[in-house]
Image (tube, grey):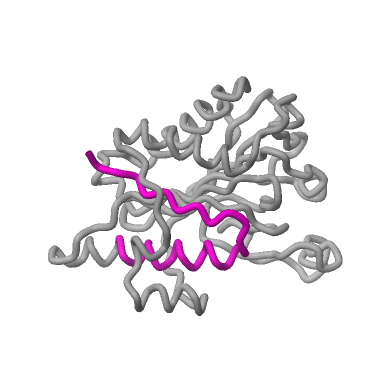
Amino acid sequence: MASLHHINLSTTPFSRASTLQSILVSKFLASKSSPTLAPPPPIAITSIFPPTYTLGRRERSISVSQRDHLCANGRAGVVSTQRGGQTTFHGPGQMTGYLLLDLQRHRLTPRCYIRMLEDSVIACLSHYGIRGYTTEDPGVWTSDTRKICAVGVHMRRNVTSFGIGLNVDTDLWWFDRIVACGLEGKEATSFVKEGVKGVGVEEVAGRWTRCVAERLGVEVVQAEGGDVLTEVEMGVWEKGVVEDGSERGVKS
């Protein structure tokens, strides 16, 4: 049976997860260009970041004053990314999940892929007694005004990257400082705000990964970077320097 490799980075700098993702995307793209290279298996990278605001492709350029505001006197990082959408927050208490796969190999259209991501989050929430659903606005919601999960992805030659940010025990003050994903009049929520306490972020990461695997029809295999990277690629990852090629961003 095919497998979904789950690499759980736990608490880690944003740059470390981003670099790993970029290296793996390059491996997927290389395998599509050369029939002699075996494609990587689908990979889920789960992480917990220090306070970090990420900018989507629709909001790559911000003013100095806007950046200073986001930095919160040095308490948060600000990073431009290739995912779709606008500004959102990642930090302690949130499970960030990046999903890397080749849509063609799984017979998924971009629209079906986004739906699969959303459905995996809804199934994960249901396991903990939280009713999540989609609306006309991006992400997964617990009411028409409360958003519990952001979804923002990037696609290049049908290879996906980025994914979701699911609030478990997040300090929602960080969201109060922005118009998250450009949605006026909406607010962020979390497991805790929805009344579900005592659930760890890493437990949720494992549950969400299993929900994804079920929808892909594969099993989950716990993995580490060394299981999917060559020795040279491991060296690049450790240095944290990699070119992030991008073409297409999709938000949801």
Please, is residue 162 above or below residue 208 in the view?
below
Tell which of 104 and 58 is nearer to you.
Answer: 104
The picture places residue 218, in percent across and down from the top left corner, at 30, 37
Corner quadrant of residue 71: bottom right
The picture places residue 88, in percent across and down from the top left corner, at 67, 50
Residue drawn at x 53%, y 57% is: 9
Residue 97 magenta: no
In the picture as drawn, the residue positioned furthest to the left comes out as 36
Residue drawn at x 22%, y 39% is: 1
Residue drawn at x 51%, y 60% is: 82
Residue 240 placement, left or right of 137: left
Residue drawn at x 36%, y 58% is: 156
Corner quadrant of residue 145: top right
Residue 91 placement, left or right of 137: right
Residue 169 placement, left or right of 36: right
Tell which of 162 and 10 is nearer to you.
Answer: 10
The picture places residue 49, in percent across and down from the top left corner, at 64, 56
Residue 7 magenta: yes
Corner quadrant of residue 245: bottom left
Residue 164 placement, left or right of 232: right
Please, is residue 245 above or below residue 46 in the view?
below
Please, is residue 152 above or below residue 137 in the view?
below
Tell which of 14 and 133 is nearer to you.
Answer: 14
- Tell me the magenta residue range: 1-28
